[in-house]
Image (cartoon, rainbow, N blue to C red):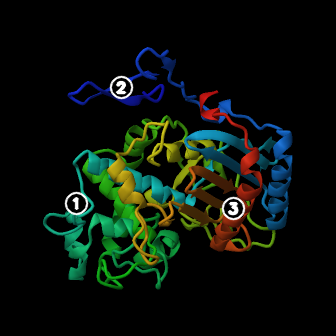
Amino acid sequence: MRTGKFILILLGAAGLIAAFPFIVRGRGEKEVPAPEYVQDLNSAIVNEDIPELRAMDHAVDSFMNFWALKAASLAIMRNDSLLYAKGYGKADPTTAMTPGTTMRLASVSKLLTAVGIMKLQEEGKIFLETPVFGPLGVLNEYDCYIKDNNYYLITVEHLLRHQAGFSTRGGDVMFSKLTFMRDWGLSEPPTPQFVVQKQIGRRLAFEPGTWQEYSNFGFLLLSLIIEKVSGLPYDQYMQEHVFAPAGCTQFRIAGNYLKDRLPGESMYFMQPDSELVPSYDGKYSAVDKCYGGNDITGLMGAGAWTASAVEMARLVGCIDGRGPMEDILSAESVRKMTTWYDADTFSLGWNDTKPDGEWTRTGSFSGTSALVKVYPDGECWIFISNTSAWRGSRFTKNTAHLCKNLRRRFSPSLPTRDLFTL
């Protein structure tokens, strides 16, 4: 397990690369120990009252009151240093939200899955141009269910960019498990494998690579690709090859009901006027949508991960191509994930990566909204809430405006420090 970050130093005329637990300042200069990074971030970082930032805290409180949010967590990082982290409101009726409280990340999970795919590519086990189906495809065990030959054109990159040809015009199967059960006469929710078998028997909406349409199902396929290629369960591969190398210990797959709440995880809340819905598995006629309305666990890499804002910041620090944190991806992988092509092309894992270096990843479903913003100057703002907003998925745009305004007003007042090295 990694206990710290190491800086690679070029040694000798031969250009040998070695890793040392200290920074060499130059000939004759004193060796300076490398920072020891805190392993258990979620318990080490606590809420603070910083006088210079009280106005920012009040602005966050006002934002939460306007949108009727029970609680939220904010983490601010600059050049891989965590400058500020705070929880606002209540994680449950008796517990305050803290920087270390974990919450569902919704579609921010797609960024994590994309990192897993890039790691496999660096390991030489898969490539972006690898076909998904067909004789040379990763998931060719499903070929017998295919009726549209366009499926054989789908590559791993098409899935990452939402260009594989899948459409939700007839409903998103990842959020329609109860309908799926009724259509196929199932007494239990379908397995991911069963969902794939039935979905790929349908025609694609467009030829792969010619258009894009956001697809949760495509990221289910990516999750299964990770399992097939690595030989490990999806979550185990991610824990061992993505999160552990980044020093993150609390990324976990979410449960569906309140009884499945993880240790240290927030509760989730709907707006007071929200209607009850049937449970995704047919067991209950009326549930809060955030607790049983959807099969969140079954989303896998499309939306099932939970984490705290501070651990999410730590992971971003390990995939941003900046120092001093040691990236878990190569510079080439970071470049591929963050290259901007045009306004109509999704980036790899990120929603959007602009030419000026601003990157965005959002996530939203019942009871959860998450935003990850990386700015060109190296600042990263992460905001996660535990309450459905009445604007639904569009709420992340309001969160982005909040972060933009707070950054403009308070960035110069942020403390100069690194909470990752407490």
Separation (CA) of disc 3 from disc 2: 38 Å
Q: Position of residue 97 (x, y in %)?
A: 75, 45
Residue 13 percent location from the top left of the image = 23, 27
Residue, x 78% and y 60% (percent of image)? 69
Q: Secondary structure at mark 3?
A: helix
Task: Spot the residue most to the left.
Answer: 135
Q: Who is closer to the viewer here, 333 or 145?
A: 333
Between marks 1 and 3 in the image, the one whose residue lies nearer the viewer: 3
Screen quadrant of the C terminus: top right
- Please, what is the three-letter code of the amino acid marked with disc 2? Ala
Mark 3 crowdedness (10 Å alpha carbons): few <14, some 14-19, many ≥20: some
* Residue bearing the label numbered 3: 404
The label number, if any, that marks residue 19 in the structure image: 2
Distance from Cα at disc 1 to Cα at disc 3? 41 Å
- Describe residue 61's horizontal placement relative to residue 204 as left or right: right
For the point 35% across and 26% down, the residue is 19
Residue located beneath label 1 in the image: 138
State the image coordinates of residue 6 (x, y, percent, origin top left).
Answer: 43, 28
Please identify the residue farthest to the front as the structure is shown: 28
The reply to whether residue 182 is in sight is: yes
Q: Is residue 288 visible?
A: no
Query: Quick one: label 1 or label 3, which is nearer the N terminus?
Result: 1
Amino acid at dot 3: Lys
Q: Amino acid at mark 1?
A: Val
User: How many numbered discs?
Assistant: 3
Mark sitting earlier along the chain (1/2): 2
In this picture, residue 135 sits left or right of residue 133: left
In the figure, 113 relative to 10: above or below? below
Q: Is residue 291 above or below residue 10?
A: below
User: What separation in Å lies between label 1 and label 2 (alpha carbons)?
Assistant: 35 Å
Give the x, y percent position of residue 387. Answer: 72, 60
